[in-house]
Amino acid sequence: MVKDLSVNLCGVGLDNPVVPASGTFGFGLEMAEVYDINCLGAISIKGTTRDARFGNPTPRIAECEMGMINSVGLQNPGVDAVIAHEIPALRKVYSKPIIANISGFAVEEYVECCSKMDKVDDVQILEVNVSCPNVHNGGMAFGTSAEAAAEVTRAVKAVTTKPVFVKLSPNVTDIVSIAKACEEAGADGITLINTMLGMRIDIARRRPVIANKMGGFSGRAVFPVAVRMVYQVANACSIPVMGCGGVATAEDVIEMMMAGATAVQVGAENLRNPFACKEIIEDLPKVMERLGINSLNEIIGIVK
Amino acid sequence: MNREKLTIISNRQVNATVWEMKLSGCAEQRPGQFVNIALDGRFLRRPISVCDWNAGVLTLLYKVVGKGTSQMAAMTAGERLDVLTGLGNGFNLEAAGSKPLLVGGGIGTAPMYYLAKKLIEVGKPVNVILGFNKADEVIYVAEFEALGAKVTVATADGSLGVKGFVTDALPAVDYDFFYACGPMPMFRALEGKVCTEGQYSFEERMGCGTGICMGCTCKTMLGAKRVCKDGPVFDRKEVIW
């Protein structure tokens, strides 16, 4: 039997739920050189800020058991260059939905970027990142307070008609209260989780491995935390959830969807296996067959 | 970039810390490119520069510095590795001039071998300066000489060749373009002495090796560049010291 992998994110149809997570797929062009990225459900492009950013000093990467820490620090060419160059270049090789991921250091910056992205026809969904652990005076600061997350959500919703997903941080005491605050402020969906704040020390040199000392921990090790938070938020909110964190296999995608995710982002796994998303999508029908699933929509949030 | 399953043909210890691995089944590589090797139990791949490629056989010289490279050193012929190949830009062979100089420091010697081979193939007289801390760290001199390259060795303690650094061997060499790979202190010293255009091959801790994560970005005169995708080779004139 033909398996139905399609899902619907706030009116945006995805052929399948697999979405490379922002920051782990660039602006799509590198992977377009090695496989046809039109197999993807959607792409969440590299986090974009109002101004161009070089990001943090190197080393930015530390390997861990079953995961890694990154402290890239939102390197990007700035929203105007992303709109003028990166998105049109991606559109030449890719016809499926594009999710623009937006970060900022003040509410006005989120507003300015979202307002500009709202006018870009090639962008279908906005993902507002209030959870980057690698920048000071912004990023995660907005995602660790329900009031601040709601304020950003309200402000960007006022300047766009596109669906807005708010990407939340796991580095909080009560994820549900923050997700609910975003929902009440008008968010169309929630993406979670961003990376967990982590640190490694080079014991021979007696100093942090990462130049910025701390960074965001991601990879397979965080999967159970991500499933738990997706489950909690999906049960507490009525807006769709994009699950993210440690996803590496088709089985992980199904587990995340059973926890309540409508779409599933693949992040750090892209760094170790550039073909990860493609392979997961190819494996999904086989795993569905084995589990007796005909349509992925049947299993979204099936675990109560 | 290709993802290939390569088979280990040989894996031999060259000196106290350096090993040479030969693998079969590899698509053609260019000098200065690198491969990225998946290892069981390691989350990230290990980027290793191409030392040689000949008729499907890839040669890697690698220094054992941590868990991943220790794991590689324990591998034997017949084992298969998941390898991303053809990564990075590689050296610009067109720029070589008529008398190219190749400078390798420590394990930075590795990519110079394939470069020397390719330059000699097109008829260039190749001078090589190799720098090490001491005589028992010296690698690949006979291999370079077998290609027909003129090799000068410098050791910091003077136990072999010129006493001092690669820059101490520089005055005796006539060149009109240079290529260098080695540690940053060597690059800085070289930068103060060289008098021609050239290319440096950089090293940085990487996430993906394919240009998607921005983990290894550096600042250049031409803006932010990824060592893995836009490099690892950069023109002398674009490097910010």
Image (cartoon, coloured by chain):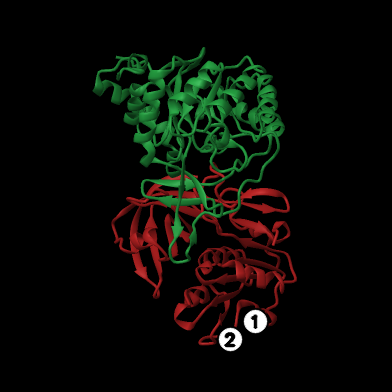
Callout 1: residue from which chain? Answer: B
- Rendered view: B124 above or below B211: below
**Residue at point 48% right, 66% down?**
A205
Amino acid tagged 1: Asp
Q: Are marks 1 and 2 in contact (CB under 8 Å)?
A: yes
Q: Return the x and y of residue A60 as percentages of the image width and height.
A: 54, 50
Checking the image for residue B163, the label placed there is 2
Chain letter of the green region: A
**Residue at point 34% right, 58% down?**
B8
Q: Return the x and y of residue A155 as percentages of the image width and height.
A: 64, 21
Foreground pick, B113 / B166: B166
Q: Colour of chain B?
A: red
The CA span between labels 1 and 2 is 8 Å
> For mark 1, what is the residue?
B168
Amino acid tagged 2: Lys
> Element type at marker 2?
strand
Foreground pick, A13 / A107: A107
How many other residues sit within 10 Å of disc 1, few (<14), some (14-19) or many (≥20)? Answer: some
> Element type at marker 1?
helix
